[in-house]
Amino acid sequence: MSNADKLKNLLELEIIPDLEAAIDELFSAIDKSKTASTTQKEDLEEMREMRTECFAIIEELGRNELDDEEVDELLAELVDMKTEED
């Protein structure tokens, strides 16, 4: 499996679902309190931006717009981020 395939799988199977779950949890917390704090608003915006970036990377992979070096860097960065999270 190429690093591009690994990156796509990591994004589709782990990163995006984790972001969507975190967004849902934040929406639930906001709904319970009936108001959003500044921190919650910032966190929500940041997570939405990250999700959008992930989808953009997947699109770029599909169009072969990323060279091997970019793919390797993104994969390493996301694996490190995921490892720190666990």
Image (spheres, rainbow, N blue to C red):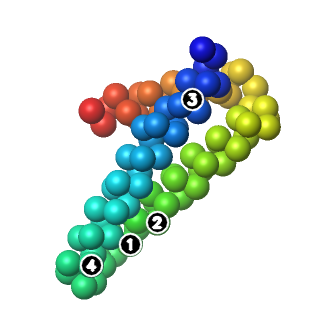
Q: Which residue is mark 3?
A: 7
Q: Which residue is mark 4?
A: 31
Q: Are marks 4 and 2 in contact (CB under 8 Å)?
A: no
Q: Secondary structure at mark 1?
A: helix
Question: Mark 1 to mark 4: distance in Å?
Answer: 13 Å
Q: Amino acid at mark 3?
A: Leu
Q: Which residue is mark 2?
A: 45
Mark with earlier residue (3, 4): 3
Q: Amino acid at mark 4?
A: Asp
Q: Which residue is mark 1?
A: 41
Question: Mark 3 to mark 4: distance in Å?
Answer: 34 Å
Judge the density around disc 2: few (<14), some (14-19), many (≥20) Cα neighbours within 10 Å. few
Q: Residue at x 60, y 14 (%)?
A: 1
Question: Mark 1 to mark 3: distance in Å?
Answer: 29 Å
Mark with earlier residue (1, 4): 4
Mark with earlier residue (4, 2): 4
Q: Residue at x 78, y 32 (%)?
A: 64
Give the left or right position of residue 1, taking residue 20 as reference: right
Question: Mark 3 to mark 2: distance in Å?
Answer: 24 Å
In depth, the one of 32 and 77 nearer the eye is 32
Depth-wise, is mark 4 or mark 2 nearer the camera? 4
Depth-wise, is mark 1 or mark 4 nearer the camera? 4
Tell me: residue 17, above or below residue 37: above
Please state the horizontal and vertical placement of residue 8, each as a whole percent of the image.
58, 33
Question: Mark 1 to mark 2: distance in Å?
Answer: 6 Å
Please state the horizontal and vertical placement of residue 17, each as a whole percent of the image.
42, 47
